[in-house]
Amino acid sequence: MESFGAINEAVKERQDLLDSFPASTAAALLRLLVAMFASLSHPEYQVLGPTIWSHYLEEHESTVVAPVGILQIIFNFHTNLLRKACFLMTHCLERSPDSMLPLIKDEMKRSVYHLTMIIPT
């Protein structure tokens, strides 16, 4: 009987360990990038910005993005991906506008064109 108790305890410990991992690698990656945002260089922001723009800003976890502090973003596991992505996007725009502005302008032009096709004037 003692062996079953030890096995159950080992299984519970491993399950607790697995439960402590982030739900997704994206959440873990964005949390890490937020934690080290101040140490990222200009070239790193040039690569990071377009990736965040194209992959993480359409997160459907939240309908409204409320402003939160940096410490809440870093230390709160439950802060959603969209807030982390918005925080990082702000820094990408500040530190590497040359790589981000053409991307944003192009997106806006496509959105306006799409709207003019849908809504007759």
Image: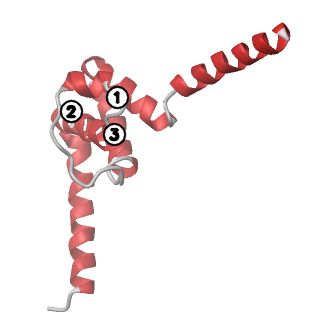
Say if mark 3 contacts mark 1, CB within 8 Å.
Answer: no
Residue situated furthest top in the rendering? 2
Structural distance between the alpha carbons of marks 2 and 3 = 18 Å
Tell me if residue 101 comes above or below residue 71 in the rendering.
below
Q: Residues within 10 Å of mark 1 (few under 14, many from 20)?
A: few
Quadrant of image for the C terminus: bottom left
Helix, strand, or loop for circle 2?
helix
The answer to whether residue 10 is above or below residue 111 is above
Label 3, label 1: how many angstroms apart (C-alpha)?
A: 23 Å
- Residue at the front extreme of this rendering: 1
Q: Are marks 2 and 3 in contact (CB under 8 Å)?
A: no
Quadrant for the N terminus, please.
Answer: top right
Q: Amino acid at mark 1?
A: Glu
| Closer to the camera in the image, 63 or 8 | 8
Give the quadrant of residue 80.
top left
Q: Is residue 13 left or right of residue 113?
A: right
Q: Which residue is mark 2?
A: 91
Q: State the image quarter where residue 89 is shown.
A: top left
Q: Is residue 38 left or right of residue 29?
A: left
Of the two numbered discs 2 and 3 in the rendering, the one whose residue sits closer to the viewer: 3
Q: Residue at x 26, y 43 (%)?
A: 99
Residue holding disc 3 = 80
* Residue 112 spot, x, y in % from top left: 20, 73
Q: Indicate which disc, 3 or 1, sits on the residue closer to the N terminus.
A: 1
Determine the residue positioned at 31% across, 44% down. Answer: 82
Question: Which residue does the image show at 37% across and 28% down from the upper left?
Answer: 77
Question: Tag 3: Cα neighbours inside 10 Å, few (<14), some, or many (≥20)?
Answer: some
Q: Secondary structure at mark 3?
A: loop
Q: Which mark is residue 44?
A: 1
